[in-house]
Image (spheres, rainbow, N blue to C red):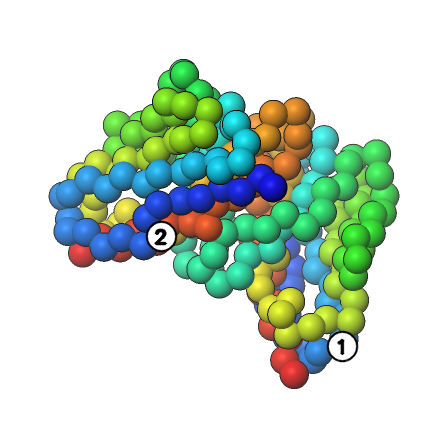
Amino acid sequence: GAVVSQHPSRVICKSGTSVKIECRSLDFQATTMFWYRQFPKQSLMLMATSNEGSKATYEQGVEKDKFLINHASLTLSTLTVTSAHPEDSSFYICSALLGGRETQYFGPGTRLLVL
Amino acid sequence: SQQGEEDPQALSIQEGENATMNCSYKTSINNLQWYRQNSGRGLVHLILIRSNEREKHSGRLRVTLDTSKKSSSLLITASRAADTASYFCATDADGTASKLTFGTGTRLQVTL
């Protein structure tokens, strides 16, 4: 149980376009989801915490107008990278918190390449 | 930054040997977790150890926690080629599971 999916798994886009990444909890309801970014051979850095039905909480240094997060249901959170630039190229990973548990369940990640 | 440090950054061993990875962190914690990440993939949760625990086992995994030194170790016994991955420790930054701070990771290579 506790499976989290992400779509797409890989995306290549031109500079200036917007990209939407979906994160779904497949077999449980997640009131809280998290979005991380990981650069090659580096650790995961938390970008924002997404709570269903409310505005996301962004970490210091993360532009909320550039990384739009929507958590419209208990099983879906989306991250939209607006006006993407090459420096936004990274591996984006989401995770979901199963209510009452202490463990985050991670999606398989989305690799974004901005040309 | 509250990010923890892990050492070694990279570890190469032969199949059958034991692998030990260490993690140090900076703040008080509620628990510490270890995750594995295969190249280009998501994270898989391995084990959680609470701040009032000193040692925990799960299969071939053994985790220790020393809160006085703010450090933890992950031991993988009788390693296999399939254990090749990056291993990260993660601590809850504010006493809940709502925010995890990840260590820098150890890249483990297990060769036949």
Q: Which residue is mark 1?
A: B16
For the C terminus of chain B, give its image quadrant: bottom right
Q: Which mark is residue B87?
A: none
| On screen, residue B23 above or below B25 | below
Q: Residue at x 40, y 44 (%)?
A: A6
Residue B93 image point, x, y percent:
61, 32
Q: Which residue is mark 2?
A: A9
| On screen, residue A59 above or below B11 | above
Say which of marks 1 and 2 sits in front: 2
Q: Nearer the viewer, residue B53 or A75?
A: A75
Q: Residue at x 14, y 43 (%)?
A: A16
Q: Nearer the viewer, residue A73 or A67?
A: A73
Mark 1: amino acid: Gly
For this view, does A107 lie left or right of residue B36? left
Pointer 2 local density, CA inside 10 Å: few below 14, some 14–19, many at least 20: some
Q: Is residue A49 visible?
A: no
Say what secondary structure mark 1 lies in: loop
Residue A52 image point, x, y percent:
44, 20
Q: Residue at x 33, y 35 (%)?
A: A79
Measure the C-alpha gap from mark 1 to mark 2.
34 Å
Q: Residue at x 75, y 63 (%)?
A: B76
Q: Nearer the viewer, residue B85 or A40?
A: B85
Tell me where residue A77 sits by quadrant: top left
For this view, does B51 lie left or right of residue A56? right
Chain hosting mark 2: A
Chain hosting mark 1: B
